[in-house]
Amino acid sequence: MTASTSITIATRESRLALWQAEHVQARLGRELGITATLLGMTTRGDQILDRTLSKVGGKGLFVKELETALAEGRAQLAVHSLKDVPMELPEGFTLAAVLEREDPRDAFVSNDYASLADLPEGAVVGSSSLRRVTQLLSLRPDLRVEPLRGNLDTRLRKLDEGGYHAIVLAAAGLKRLDLAHRVRAVFEVEQMLPCAGQGALGLEIRTDDGALAEALARLAHMPTQLACEAERAVSRALGGSCSLPLAAHARWQGATLCLDAALGHAELHTSPLLRAPAAADVTDVASARALGQQAAAQLREQGAGAYLPG
C-alpha cells in the first residue's frame, strides 16, 4: 500500500468504540501513512438491551453489521474489542492484527463501597457476563448479581441512578475514556480471571485483502497477539460463547507463556469453579494455540463436560 492509500474503518458508535477506531485511525496515519475515515454503525448487540447476550445470539451481534460493511466494500477494516469477537470468524474474514493490550483486569465500580469485601450482605451487583457472575458468586455467594446491559456510559448512569450497589466493568474501557477515577478497586487475576482477549483490540479485514493485511501486520503487538491466541484457543476448544462462563488469561514470564483458564457451570452459578494452569515456551501462533488446547484438555479432565450447555 502507498502513502496515498485511503481506507474506511467500520466501527460501532459507542463512545468507547469510537475512541478505539480513532486510536487505530491515528496509528494508520502516523505509522503507515494511510488515511482513514470512520463509518459509524449500530449493531444488533447495541440495539437489544433488555436481554443478556447469551439469550439473543452472543457476541457476534456486535460484529455482524461491521462484517457486512467489509463484505460489501463500504469499509476495508473493522476495529473490535477482541473480547467481543467470536472464536470462529465467518469464511472470508480474518484478524489481521492484535494491538498491544491495555489493562486486562476487571474493575469494581461503586459510589458507596471501596471494594467487593465492603459490600453489605445481599448487595446488588450489576453484570450480564456469565463469567463475572460465576466468579463474583464464588467470592461472595450472598450477593445478588443482576443483569446490566448497554455501553459503558449507560452502565455507569444506571449505577448513578441507584439501581446497583456496585457494577463490574473492564478496566481497559474506563482507562481509555479517562474514567479511571470511577474505579474503586481492581480485581487481580487471581480473584477474577478475565475473558479471552480482554483489553486488546482486534483489526478485522477480508481475507482477500493481502495488501492491507501486510500493512496492518506492522501494527501488531506479537506478545499480546500470541497471548490472545492461547486464550482464544481455550474457548474455541470448549465451544466457548456468551452462554459459557469461561475465563482465560495468559501472561509472559520471559519466553514462557503462562496461561490460566477457569470454567463455571453454565446454569448452577454456585458450582465450584474448575481451574487449569498451563505454561509453555511459545514462539508462534501454532504453539500458542497448542497451549490453549492443553488448558482446555485439563478442564475436560476435571469434568468440564458436565458444566457445558446442552
Image (cartoon, rainbow, N blue to C red):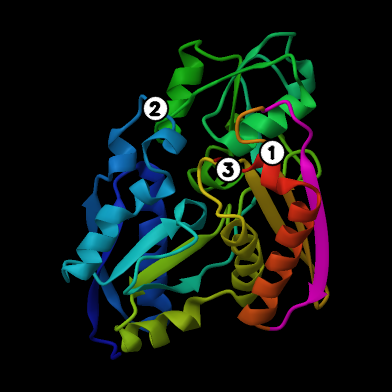
Q: CA distance from mark 3 to mark 1?
A: 8 Å
Q: Position of residue 307 (x, y in %)?
A: 67, 40
Q: CA distance from mark 3 to mark 2?
A: 16 Å
The amino acid on which the numbered mark 3 sits, given as a three-letter code, is: Leu
Give the residue number, with chain letter if any, for mark 1.
264
Tell me if I can see residue 216 in this picture.
yes
Task: Tell me the tag on residue 64.
Answer: none
The answer to the question of whether label 2 and label 1 lie on touching residues, with beta carbons closer than 8 A, is no
Q: Is 159 above or below relative to 54?
A: above
Tell me the quadrant of the picture where the N terminus can be found.
Answer: bottom left
Q: Position of residue 200 (x, y in %)?
A: 55, 59
Range drawn in magenta: 269-283
Q: Give the secondary structure at mark 1.
A: loop
Q: Is 141 above or below relative to 244?
A: above
Q: Give the secondary structure at mark 3.
A: loop
Give the residue number, with chain letter if any, for mark 3.
244
The amino acid on which the numbered mark 2 sits, given as a three-letter code, is: Arg
